Image (cartoon, rainbow, N blue to C red):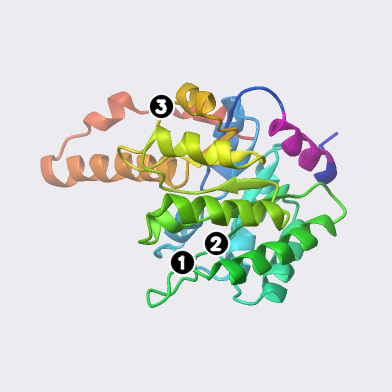
Amino acid sequence: MPASQAEKAERFRELHHRAGAFVMPNPWDAGSARVLAGLGFEALATSSGACAGMLGRRDGAVTREEAFAHARAIVKATDLPVSADLERCFADEPAGVAETIGLAAGIGLAGASVEDATGSPERPLYSLEEAGARVRAAAAAARGSGIPFVLTARAENFIRGNPDLGDTIARLRAYEAAGAEVLMAPGLPDLEAVRAVCAAVSRPFNFMAGIKGKSFPVEALAAAGVKRVSLATSLYRAAMTGLVEAAREVKERGSFGYIETSLPTPELNRFMQ
């Protein structure tokens, strides 16, 4: 029998409390989700950037309904728990954030994230007071979902033009106090910063791999205190890199060398239903 949403959510929560770190890759569609499940990963996450790319758009240009449709397809593709990258939860006010989290729980997800970036270049980040209120509302909605829905709160300083480690730690502590179960700060510059963040909080910390020069081995991250490693758009970008390189070979050289290193169809089919 397929696992229920509650069972998957409980399994997802348990991953954050066992020894060591686990990797939660980010598929971009049902097929890539099945491949990752077939390779033995234990949980998956959506990526807002990959979702946008699948629609031919840039990151940040997706509606809530489109993000939910994308997440629903990945949820249905495997029996793994799935956490959704919901950016700013498509709302400024805490009530709107809570509504988004409540709806997210209703489509079969085991968790989701809320971030403190506004989406506006004029004011890239919500104030600490605003962001804390948004996390509190999201946490209340997660608790009211009827399942052990895992809420992740993201401090976006380092990728939004404010590389202030002290402020990042202050924000993460505030989000922890507001009820977030997992904390995240994309773009930390080095393992020393990772260690400082992990030492400053008591909730599981998610490290985002995917930035050149700032993506460290899982073993080193685990030793620094990281519990969960997500991959953002990096797998999607790797797949698109293969597409661009293969298509350029055909267009510019008229050759098909990429075929010699491609997975054969029967091997790919083994991952599919």
Comparing marks 1 and 2, which lies closer to the viewer?
A: 2
Q: Which residues are magenta?
A: 7-17
Label 2: state its secondary structure.
Answer: loop
Q: Circle 2 sits on which residue? A: 87
Gap between marks 3 and 2, in whole Å?
34 Å
Q: Amino acid at mark 2?
A: Glu
Comparing marks 3 and 1, which lies closer to the viewer?
A: 1
- The vertical placement of 31 against 91, above or below, is above
Point out residue 114 in the picture as x, y percentages from the top left corner: 61, 59
The crowd level at tag 3 (other Cα within 10 Å; few <14, some 14-19, many 20+) is: few
What residue lies at 37% left-to-right and 37% top-to-bottom?
190
Along the viewing direction, whichever of 54 and 213 lies nearer the viewer: 213
Is tag 3's residue or tag 1's residue first in the polypeptide sequence? Answer: 1
Specify the quadrant that holds the C terminus: top right
Magenta region includes residue 14: yes
Point out residue 251 in the picture as x, y percentages from the top left corner: 17, 47
- The vertical placement of 252 against 225, above or below, is below
Specify the quadrant that holds the N terminus: top right
Is residue 199 found left or right of 193 in the rendered image? Answer: right
Comparing marks 3 and 2, which lies closer to the viewer?
A: 2
User: What secondary structure is the stretch in magenta mostly built from?
Assistant: helix
The answer to whether mark 1 and mark 2 are in CB contact below 8 A is yes
The answer to whether mark 3 and mark 2 are in CB contact below 8 A is no
Q: Circle 3 sits on which residue? A: 263
The crowd level at tag 1 (other Cα within 10 Å; few <14, some 14-19, many 20+) is: some
What residue lies at 45% left-to-right and 56% top-to-bottom?
49
Is residue 176 found left or right of 223 in the rendered image? Answer: right
What residue lies at 38% left-to-right and 74% top-to-bottom?
121
Q: Amino acid at mark 3?
A: Leu
Q: Circle 1 sits on which residue? A: 60
